[in-house]
């Protein structure tokens, strides 16, 4: 055996692989000098082994690719929707201010309820023949007032009936208020006409001969009265007569008996339209209100007396 083989066996016993490759090369006839040339070859083979370990760095570069992908997803995520919802919540807060606005609206509706009408109710207002037979209206005007047509300027009756209102007090029976120069000195029977009757004398309650005068027209006002209006109301009211019993009324029922026009009436007022109180040709509005014994004035009732 060659001394190179023995060296190889000795080296195998020691377990060194590098010298094994050197012994094999010596057996192939390359000589001991070629062994150092084989030594650089294993070192390059060790370098390619490191090259496969280099691929992990590219994987590390793949992770930064995911990082840019996440930022675009963040704006498109639900975080964008969350800021929109808080913007909608402030819009809910102005809505309660709108609910506060309607609250002042009911306040204008309170004045009508604060002014109840306590006075008596006019249950009947009309025209009757001299014998007491009530006339039927021939129509209504554009305001819904009944129209009573008469063929002559005088020679008929005007009647008014009433009953207690919300005050439950009976209608008054004072036809003339003796207070002078007082716009509030009104009688319990408040009758106004839109045009003068007869000669329209401004004298108050001139009903005794030889001086018989008419009634001036007065302003058809619901509340305010001037002194001239108060005088005209007293002038007309003092000519009426009052009936507190249905059996002693100035009107007749269908059977020819003396009766109030309306069964609910508790009082009746009547006046004779004579030559001193003639109605002028055309339409004359008659407005009536009643006052109870406590001074409460009721709602007005109106009619139209038409003379051709």
Image: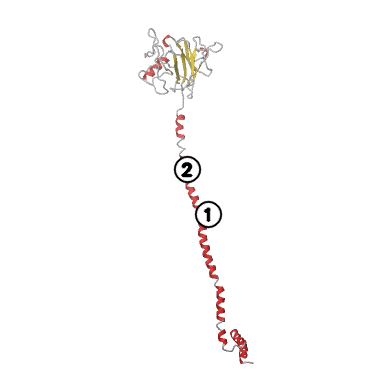
Q: Circle 1 sits in a helix, a strand or a loop, which is it?
A: helix
Which residue is depicted at the point 47% across and 46% down?
91
Which residue is depicted at the point 42% across and 9% down?
275
Residue 172 image position (x, y, % from top left): 45, 19
Farthest residue in the top direction?
Answer: 210
Q: Circle 2 sits in a helix, a strand or a loop, which is it?
A: helix
Which tag, 1 or 2, sits closer to the chain's start? 1
Q: In which quarter of the image is residue 11?
A: bottom right
Left or right of 308 in this view: 6: right
Farthest residue in the front direction?
Answer: 30
Residue 203 image position (x, y, % from top left): 37, 13
Q: In which quarter of the image is residue 108?
A: top left
Q: Residues within 10 Å of mark 2 (few under 14, many from 20)?
A: few
Q: Is residue 104 above or below residue 161?
A: below
Which residue is depicted at the point 37% across and 18% down?
228
Residue 68 image position (x, y, % from top left): 51, 61
Q: Nearer the viewer, residue 305 or 208?
A: 305
Dot 1 and dot 2 residues touching (CB under 8 Å): no
Q: Nearer the viewer, mark 1 or mark 2?
A: 1
Q: In this view, does 233 lie above or below 28?
A: above
Which residue is disc 2 drawn over? Answer: 96
Residue 26 image position (x, y, % from top left): 60, 88
Q: Which of 265 and 286 is in front in this view?
A: 286
Which residue is disc 1 drawn over? Answer: 78
The quadrant of the rendering that contains the N terminus is: bottom right
Left or right of 131 in this view: 19: right
Q: Which of 178 and 230 is in front in this view?
A: 230
């Amino acid at each position: 055996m060659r001394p190179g083989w023995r060296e190889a066996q000795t080296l195998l016993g020691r377990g060194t692989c590098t010298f094994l490759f050197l012994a094999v090369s010596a057996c192939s006839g390359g000589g001991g000098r070629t062994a150092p040339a084989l030594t650089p070859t294993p070192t390059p083979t060790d370098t390619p082994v490191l090259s496969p370990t280099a691929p992990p760095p590219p994987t590390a570069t793949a992770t930064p690719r995911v990082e840019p992908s996440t930022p675009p997803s963040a704006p498109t995520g639900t975080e964008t929707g969350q800021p929109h919802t808080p913007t909608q919540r402030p819009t809910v807060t102005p809505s309660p201010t709108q609910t506060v606005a309607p609250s002042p609206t009911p306040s204008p509706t309170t004045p009508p309820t604060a002014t109840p009408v306590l006075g008596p109710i006019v249950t009947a207002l009309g025209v009757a023949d001299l014998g007491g037979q009530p006339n039927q209206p021939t129509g209504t005007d554009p305001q819904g007032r009944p129209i009573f047509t008469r063929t002559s300027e005088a020679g008929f009756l005007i009647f008014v009936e009433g009953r207690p209102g919300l005050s439950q007090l009976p209608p008054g029976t004072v036809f003339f208020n003796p207070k002078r120069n007082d716009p509030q000195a009104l009688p319990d029977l408040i009758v106004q006409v839109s045009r003068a009757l007869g000669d329209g004398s401004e004298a108050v309650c001139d009903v005794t001969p030889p001086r018989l005068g008419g009634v001036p027209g007065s302003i058809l006002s619901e509340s305010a009265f001037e002194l001239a209006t108060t005088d005209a109301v007293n002038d007309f009211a003092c000519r009426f007569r009052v009936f507190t019993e249905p059996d002693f009324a100035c009107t007749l029922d269908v059977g020819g008996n003396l009766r109030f026009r309306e069964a609910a009436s508790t009082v009746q007022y009547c006046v004779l339209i004579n030559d001193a109180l003639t109605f002028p040709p055309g339409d004359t509005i008659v407005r009536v209100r009643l006052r109870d014994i406590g001074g409460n004035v009721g709602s007005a009732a109106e009619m139209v007396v038409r003379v051709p």
